[in-house]
Image: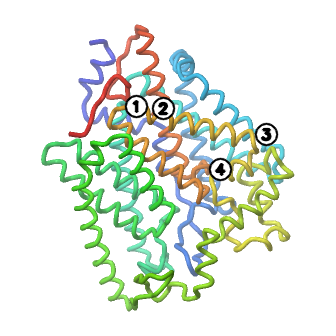
Amino acid sequence: MNRIQERISNSAPAQKIASIFSLPIFWMLLGPPAIRTAVDDDRSGLSSLQGDQDIWNYIRLVWWLLFGTIALILIIRERRLLQQMLSEIGKPVAFVSLYLVGMFVSIVLSPVPMFTAANVVMMFLLIIATVHMALKIYGGVLPISRVLQYLLWTAVFLLLFVSAIYLMFPQLVSTGVFGARLRGEGFAYAPLLSVVSVYLGIHFFLLNKSRRRLLYVFPILFGFYWLMLGQTRSAYLGMAVGAFMMFWANGKLAKNVVNLTAVAVAGMIGLIGIGMLYGTSQRVTWYLDRNYERFIVRDYWALKDAEIQAKSLATLNGRTEAAAVLLNGVASHPLGLGYIGGVRSYMSRPDVLSTLPDKAFIGAHNGYLEVLGGAGIFALLGFVLWLGWVVMHAWRFKHVDALMVLGILFVLLVEGFFESEISLPFHQSAVLIWMMGGIVAASVAYDRRIRLRRPENFGPPRRFESEVVQQYD
């Protein structure tokens, strides 16, 4: 056993925890909050999209500068290992470079260059932090299973934290438990984290054969509960697509999850019942509403105009209308309007704003259009090629941890069609999608090094090597 392997095997639990919390990207995942200054009539008082106002914009920028700079210094110290890893990865380095070039060019084209520059720098530093994490995995210092464990309990902690926020400050909820979409976006994007909690809870429940496996029942049920409270269709669709892709990639996983899913669904029904009882205690009136030739249970805050409902459904709540408006602007600006800042500045113009379905649609509400509109066609090309490479290689690996990475990737990719979060550098969705990409890239680089049989002074902990096939039993 070489020295680094021996150091890992003999490390105390505290040192293992330190190996996670010393990674800048995990602090970016936690991130500083962005609190809305006024509570709207129809939404939660927490939002992650108020980045063009108040002090939180500066706090986030300083936060990213701090941890991004730490990551940059650390990878410079490991530049020899970095060169080797990048040479093993190959083409994706060019894809990400094309993406970043488009981002930096958009600063010059933006009508608000300072705001655009701040967001471009934050995205650049997020990618730097991703590279640092990938180096740790590639170098055999950080097991992927430990990363996934951290993600699970971080998701649970943030959901508990947001629960406490809503319980202590009920004024942040504008209508009620089922009448509002409780997404807690300022501190934690609950729809995404709830899916992560369910996926990883099931993952570690199936892997753990001791009584400790019961510990993972809580993240599963709690994740389902918050998924219900979020009322976010993109999260529901993403979870379904991610699960389908995982089941397709591993038939044994599908077979073993059936019983566990039955228990989880039963638990979720029980939680819904508790929620409805709570709503009734808060004077919520429930009734059966005939809509689209079927009966559904609704509360009295639901829209009652069928024509408005049909239009909302057909346009994805106005998203397709907003996308058409943004694409008109992109047609005359193929290199972008300015990353994030330029898009919002363009869509806030009175002549453009009057054509939007609502003032809330001053952003793309689509992660891919956000990149296209902000940084142009070349940045979008680099971004899509990078994501395609990541998904393709995540699919090829046979290790059970790879299934979770694959599932979370598809959840994020689906979310990207309905929300901008995967392209907003300060958002947890963006941090997660780059984190998943970094895990896959590091695993590919290590796998290629093994195939070439290069002698090194370090060895891997648990990883995705294609030679290692590990199934759920």
Asked if marks 3 and 2 touch (Cβ < 8 Å), the reply is: no
Q: Which residue is mark 3?
A: 105
Q: Which residue is mark 1?
A: 397
User: Which label was assigned to residue 368?
Assistant: 4
Q: Position of residue 79 (x, y in %)?
A: 55, 18
> Considering the numbered disc 3 on the image, is that residue within a helix, a strand or a loop?
helix
Mark sitting earlier along the chain (3/1): 3
- State the SS at label 1: loop
Is 343 displayed left or right of 456 in the figure?
right
Mark before the other along the chain sequence, 3 or 2: 3
Q: Nearer the viewer, residue 417 or 426?
A: 417
Mark 2 element type: helix
Residue 61, horizontal then vertical, whole percent: 62, 48
Give left or right: position of 367 versus 183.
Answer: right
Classify mark 1: residues with Cα within 10 Å, few (<14), some (14-19) or many (20+): many
Label 2 sits on residue: 393
> Front-most of 169 and 181?
181
Name the secondary structure under disc 4.
helix
Furthest-left residue in this view = 211
Q: Amino acid at mark 1?
A: Phe
Instruction: Please report contact status of discs 3 and 4: CB closer than 8 Å, yes or no.
Output: no
Image quarter where the N terminus lies is top left
